[in-house]
Each structure stands twice: as C-alpha cells, then as structure tokens.
Image (tube, rainbow, N blue to C red):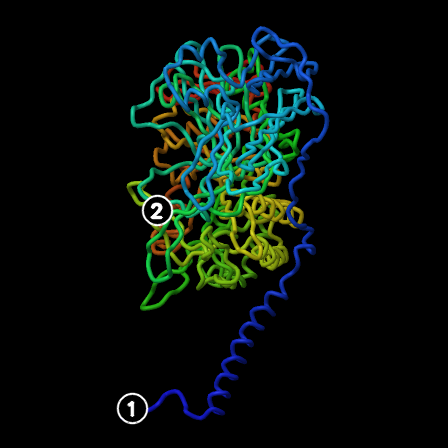
Amino acid sequence: MLRRIWPTSVSTRLLIVLAMGLLTAGSLLFASGRWDRLPGLQEMGIDAPPGNAFPVFQGDPWVAPPTGPDGFAEVAQNRRFALYVDPKTSQIAVRNKESGFLWRSNPPASQIEKETVKGALLENLQSPFILEYVAGASTRRIQSNSLDPKLNATYVPIRDGIQITYDYGELNLSFAMQYVLTEAGFELRIPDAGLKEAGEMKLFSLNPLPYFGAVAGKEEEGYLFVPDGPGGIIRYDSRPPAHVRGYDFAIYGDDPAHLKEGFFKPKREPISYPVFGLARGDEAYAAIVSEGKYNASIRALPSGIVSSYHSLSVNFPYRQEYGRRVSGLTDEKVKTIEAERASTDRRVEYRLLHGDEADYVGMAHAYRQYLEDNDMLPERLAPTERIPLHLSLIGGGMKPKFGGYRYEPATTFRQAERIVEQLLQEGVANLRITFQGWQRSGRASTDQRLPIAKDIGGTDGARAFVSTMKEKGIPVLFEDTVGWKRPEHSDFSMRTDGVRAIDSTVLQGRFRFNDEFTLIPGVLGDFIVHPAKAIRGQKEVIDALGRIGASGIHYVDGPGNLLYSDYNADARLSRADTAYYYSSLLRYTKNEFGSVGVKRGYDYALKYAELVEEFPLESSYDLIVDETVPFYPIAVHGAVPYTSTPGNLRNQYDLDLLKAIEYGAIPSFKLTYAPSRALTDTDYGDVYSSEFAVWKDRIAAEYAKFDSLAAVYHQRIEDHERAEDGVFVTTYEDGTKVTVDYNAMQFYVKEGGGEDR
C-alpha cells in the first residue's frame, strides 16, 4: 500500500507551507542583503546615463530664395562651406568654397536619366532618405522615400542650417532631419523628439543620405572606405563576385540580446569605430556617426549591386525583428517586430576633405581630430628611449583531476620574477606586465576571485611581486572580466541579475568558432551581469587589488569589446547605456590606480585606456574589400599604445610581425613558466605555445627589432602609402619613414634627419 507523501492534516499542511515560505523569504533576504551591501554607483562617482538632448525647432517656415538652374536655393554659409536645398525634392548640396566642388545628396537629374533601374530603386536614387515602416503587428516592411505621394515636407530655418520635417499625414507618422554647417563640413541630426507615431504605423528603420556623394561606375578614380578591422577600401574599378550583396554590418558588432542567428557565418572583425568615407579624385569625406552609433550599421553598395552607383551610408534601425517562442513547451518561433522603439537622437558628422587629405589617411586625420575635439583620447604619450614590451603572464587555471577539479599552477609569482630578471638580462627594457589566471576559482570569467590563488603564492606572493616590480619601474596590472559569467562561478544570480534578451528571457549562451571558423553555440549557461550591478561588485576587486599595490586592472571582457542591450521590463538599457557604464568603470578604475587596459579597443574606451591589447589590425577578409589599410592605427597612434596578437600565438609569425611594425603596434607576448601543457583543459587551453624557456631568445630578438621604433612611439602617423606591390611606407611626425617590404620580409627605418636605422 502506498503511503501518502502530502499529509492529510490541514494544520500540518499549513506548517509546511509556512516553513517553505520562511525558507524562500530567508533566501531572498540573504540575496537582497548581499545586494544591499554592495556600494552604490554614486559612491563611485557614477550617475545615471544621460538622455536625449536634440531639440525640435518651431518657427516660421523657410522662405526659399530664388533657385539656381539646378533647382537649389542657398540655406546657410560659413567661411568654408555653403549649404543648399532643393525645395521641391528636399535634396541637399554642400559646396566646398576652397575647391568649388559641390557635394550632392543624390545624383543630378542628367545622370539619373542614364540609370537602368526602375521603380522604387530609381526613386531611392532621388531621395535623401530611405524609410521602412510596419503596420501594427505585421512583419512586412513597407519602404518609402521622399517621392512618396503620401508625404508632405515642411522647412524651418535653424542656426547655420535647416530643419526638414517629413509628415505622412494619413499614416500618422512623421520625423525631422536637420542639416547644420560646421567648420569641417556639416552635421546631419535626427532628433528623437521629432519622431511621431500616432497611429498603427511604426518606424522600422531610417537610412539617411543613402547616396551622398555617390559615384557612377568607373567614371572617377577613388574608393569607398569601410571600418572593417583596421580599415578597408572598395575601389571603383574592381568588381565584386556575383554572390556578394554589399557590405552591411553593425557598428560594434551584433547585439547579442537581439538573438540573431549566427550559424554558418564566417568569422568577422566587429566594427570598432563608427566611421565611413568616400574618395573621388581630389575630394573626399569622412562621415562619423556620433549619437545613435550604438544602434546603427554601415552600408556600402558598390556599382552593380543595387544601381550603377557606388554608395555608402549609415542605417539606423528603430526596431528589431526576432523570433518569439510560441510557448515554453516547444522551440517553435514566430517572427515578431519589437513593440517599443529605440529612443535615441541620431547624428552623423560629415567632414569634407580636399587635395592631399582626400584619401584614407586624410579621413583618419579627420577622425583623430574628431576624437580630440570630443575629448575621446587621452593625453599624448611621452617620449621614451626604449619601446614598451607588453608581457602577459598566466598564473594557472582549474582543470579536471581524479574525478574533480584542482588549480594547476603555470606561473607562480616567484617564477614571474625569474622571467622578468632573465628578460632584463637579455636587454629587454620598459616591461609592462598583466597577470592573468590569478583568481582563486581558477576561472577566467568569474566573480570568485579573492583571495588570490594560493598555488601561485596567494595574496602575500602577489604583494611581494608587485612591490619588487615597482622597484624596477615595471607596472603590474591584473587581468579581469566583467562581461560573460558562468553561474557556478558567479556570486550573481542569472535569474535576477542577468541581462534579458529581446524576447524577455535571460540572455544565455554565446557563440564561438570551431576550427573551420564556423559559428557554433557556446555554453548555454553563460550569462551577462547587468552592467550597473557588475560595476558595483567590481569595487570589491578594485579595493583588494589596490591594497596589494597593483598598478591597475586590464579588462579583457566587457569594457572595450562587448556591448549589449538589456530588455528587462523594469530597467531597460540600451547599448549606449552599457557603453556609458563601461566607460564610467574605466574612469573609476583609472582614478583609483592610475592605469587601466582593455582588449580590442572600441573607440568609446580609448579615453581611459593605458593599453589596448590585440587592437584590430586584421580584416574580415571580405571578398568585397579590396585592400586593408591602417585607418584606426593612424587615428590613435601617439595617444594610445596598442598591441597585435601576442608574438607566441601568431598564425604567420614573420608576416604578422611585419604587419605589427607597419601599423605601429608595440611587441607583446603571453607566457607561462611551466610548459604550455599545464594549461590544457583550463580556461587558457587555447594558449598552445607559452613556455618562457622556449621563447626567451626569440623575445629578445624581436624586441630589438621593435626597439628601433622607440623614437616614434609617441608620434602621430602622418602618412601611409603603398610604394609598390608588397612594399608599404609609414611616415611619422618628425619625418621618420618605416618601410615594410613583404617581398623581402624585411623592414627599414629612415630617421627624420635622413639617417637609416
């Protein structure tokens, strides 16, 4: 006879329910108590993210002066430029007074007559925007442009420019675009306050100025510049393979919270800086996306893909399409458009270039000036007699042993001292050290960091090592992560502290690449801690490392290489909010220590970075990109030191070494004292060749090569060119030229004074 498990007595049942309630409440109180003990963001000098600021202007309508033969009327002018608008079409044009060149938002009518495309594609060529909207819950996107008969455009003059409001009266949908002249060109602004959705129709995306400066076929010499890796150019005289449908990728990579299917896509270098550009003869522009850059993509369309024109622009999505689960009992999904609109101002600054600056180098100079104008770069680097060497030492990690796990040491703090001593004896100078694998849990992505792993020397060993290094003038940063976490190694709760994806579920799992560079699912249990909570928890680590005298923290996951949204209904965050919190963490860390580092180096992180590890120096090898160029290095060299792939982990050792020299990187190695097999099955198992004894002589030899560039470490890159096939020349401020010859696999340095080195 079966016993009843659930008691029949009502009083006993009530006691059990009460006990269960007390246990639940106790666990919640424990969790909330821990949460309450974390410091507030205000204690760290971190406020809430800023809101939108662009106003929508009201006033008397613009009265257009007499138009010229081309239908344009002048709106505003300054010392260098003049802005024109066609009152009938709302097309714009900007004249460079110095060169007389007229930049147009769209091809002129005389060229449109030659175009072979028809219908909506032909209309798009004549419109200063392409808009997509959806009706109610439908996922069908309806495309529109300025030639839509349902549209009414009104003009209001504003300071140094004009505001154009586009109103789809019967659709109850409207938005405003503002054009304002600057000393470098002009700005396009799309104020969020000017976007109205009063009916069933909802804005899906807006592609402003899709054909600004567009060039037909092979009529002119030049190229499109796209922010692929360090920089990529698409030449007008090349023809992409038939299956290539253009370049259209999100700035800072895809948002993991949008749950885009990532399978079977080739490995990509996420876009690290929000710039695109176009060069045509002696004229060029660099377009820099500022507001709205965290939710935008760069779109480049060579001739023959959509029309006969080469064009590029920014596309602003306002809503995302995603797969919503039908129920929790099945994996079946239906396509859905998110209900809430991404609410943010949008701005693109076009810097117009002429003459010697009308190329990718001039675009990089314009972007550098933008970074400086907006206080996004640190102070210029100080001159140095010896080039810095970035040395990353791996303490160890957790690996399976005898049915369980144990920490496997690979480099104790005493052994780290021996490595440093031997490198100094070999003539290596100006060392900068980051120490990883120091956490007691033996895991990289963990909140269980402290106390420092005893198998490598513990807290006392770390303090002694840092002290000894300081006596030698060597800074020591400790590597850490604030991005992805494993639940079993985190003090945070995935359910209550994890960010939520667009379908409101906790965002879990990340994608990784297999040996064939095919995206496959990562560990499903991984989750991302809400950035504000992660920062509050990070203060404990900052304080503890500060007590042992660390020089700073080097963040390898989170600030500098990861951006995401949080769709938590109670506290929704945009990617702009995440970038704000991460920037605030970098500022706080630097203020506490004096030094902070990041990996990869998204441009929002440059202001506080003392070092960017594995800076994007490789392209995505897109078939559409004809040539990789050092745009990003040109923009930041002399302000931010950066490394390429560690020397002991390069795919093509000599070739990648020369690329690092051509692009102005500093040398870097990732080492262990023990043989690299000690890292097998740990979180550092991908470091396949790391034993110091094996690499010591090669480090010294490589350092001597990089050290010949010590004099230009703090200098800006003034020029870069291809002298001939396989030979490239990088020129610095003082005239020093570094020639890299990939044919002979050598490089040469000619000092500014003319002496060879």
Image quarter (top left, top right, bottom left or bottom right) of the N terminus: bottom left
Pinpoint residue 709: horizontal percent, then vertical percent.
52, 26
What's the residue at 42%, 17% (across, down)? Answer: 309
Q: Relative to residue 493, is residue 82 drawn left or right? A: right
Classed neighbour count for the residue bearing mark 2: other residues with Cα under 10 Å, few (<14), some (14–19), many (≥20)? some
Residue reaching furthest front? 170
Pinpoint residue 360: horizontal percent, then vertical percent.
50, 20
Q: Relative to residue 361, is residue 325 drawn left or right? A: left
Q: Which label is found at residue 688?
A: 2
Q: Which label is found at residue 101?
A: none
Q: Amino acid under label 1?
A: Leu
Above/below status of 202 relative to 713: below
Closer to the camera, 40 or 133?
133
Closer to the camera, 164 or 711?
164
Task: Looking at the image, tell me whether mark 1 or mark 2 is earlier in sequence order.
Answer: 1
Above/below status of 209 relative to 755: below
**Which residue in the structure is indicated by mark 1?**
2
Is label 2 in a helix, a strand or a loop?
loop
What's the residue at 51%, 84% (across, down)? Answer: 19
In the rendered image, is residue 757 in sight?
A: no
What's the residue at 62%, 15% (across, down)? Answer: 84
Pinpoint residue 666: horizontal percent, then vertical percent.
50, 34
Closer to the camera, 403 or 232?
232
Counting labels gives 2
Is label 1 in a helix, a strand or a loop?
loop
